[in-house]
Image (cartoon, grey):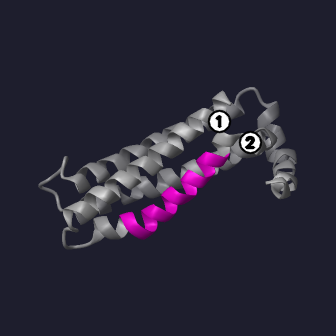
């Protein structure tokens, strides 16, 4: 991890990081936007997972539900990544020694990879996937995305 320290120092020293750190209002505004994006993302993922489990919107075809929520999922994830990068730049050195930050980054990476490689093909398949696969997919998805949220909250407590 020490090999990454120069990168964290560089991020911490960027003009963007300094401006956010020196401002009384920027950090809370960016963090609020970050949390709103996370809320929308978790909401769309939760609805998709509940549909995948057969616990909600049973009369709606899964691909239709997925297509309807795709823009919310994509744009909220993008907003979360942009605002998260800004927040990171403002306190990169704090994040360097933070186990919750490392957990969040690993979980976020896994959640994104899982979402695009396993989850989306499962929910977008025209035929219903086998029930055990749907249950496993939904559970892994929820554990990963809510793990991102919990680890993110833990960063502020560490």
> x%, y% of residue 49?
30, 52
Residue that numbered label 1 is attached to: 155
Characterize the magenta stretch by its predominant secondary structure: helix
Q: Nearer the viewer, residue 146 or 41?
A: 146
When the figure is inspected, residue 35 is found, relative to residue 3, above or below; the finding is above
* Residue at x 45%, y 63% (from the top left corner): 114
Q: Nearer the viewer, residue 147 or 64?
A: 147
Residue 89 visible within the image: yes
Residue that numbered label 2 is attached to: 95
- Residue 126 located left or right of residue 137: left
Q: Secondary structure at mark 2?
A: helix
> x%, y% of residue 54?
18, 52
Q: Residues within 10 Å of mark 1 (few under 14, many from 20)?
A: some
Q: Residues within 10 Å of mark 2 (few under 14, many from 20)?
A: some
Q: Are marks 1 and 2 in contact (CB under 8 Å)?
A: yes
When the figure is inspected, residue 97 is found, relative to residue 116, above or below; the finding is above
- Residues shaded magenta: 102-119
């Amino acid at each position: 991890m020490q090999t990454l320290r120069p990168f964290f120092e560089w991020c911490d020293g960027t003009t963007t990081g300094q401006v956010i750190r020196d401002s009384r209002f920027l950090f809370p505004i960016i963090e609020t936007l970050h949390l709103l994006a996370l809320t929308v993302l978790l909401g769309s993922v939760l609805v998709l997972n509940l549909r995948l489990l057969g616990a909600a919107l049973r009369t709606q075809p899964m691909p239709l539900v997925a297509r309807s929520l795709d823009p919310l999922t994509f744009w909220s994830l993008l907003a979360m990544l942009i605002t998260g990068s800004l927040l990171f730049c403002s306190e990169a050195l704090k994040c360097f020694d933070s186990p919750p930050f490392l957990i969040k980054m690993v979980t976020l990476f896994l959640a994104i990879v899982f979402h695009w490689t396993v989850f989306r093909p499962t929910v977008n398949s025209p035929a219903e996937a086998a029930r055990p696969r749907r249950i496993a997919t939904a559970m892994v998805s929820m554990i990963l995305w809510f793990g991102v949220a919990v680890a993110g909250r833990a960063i502020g407590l560490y």
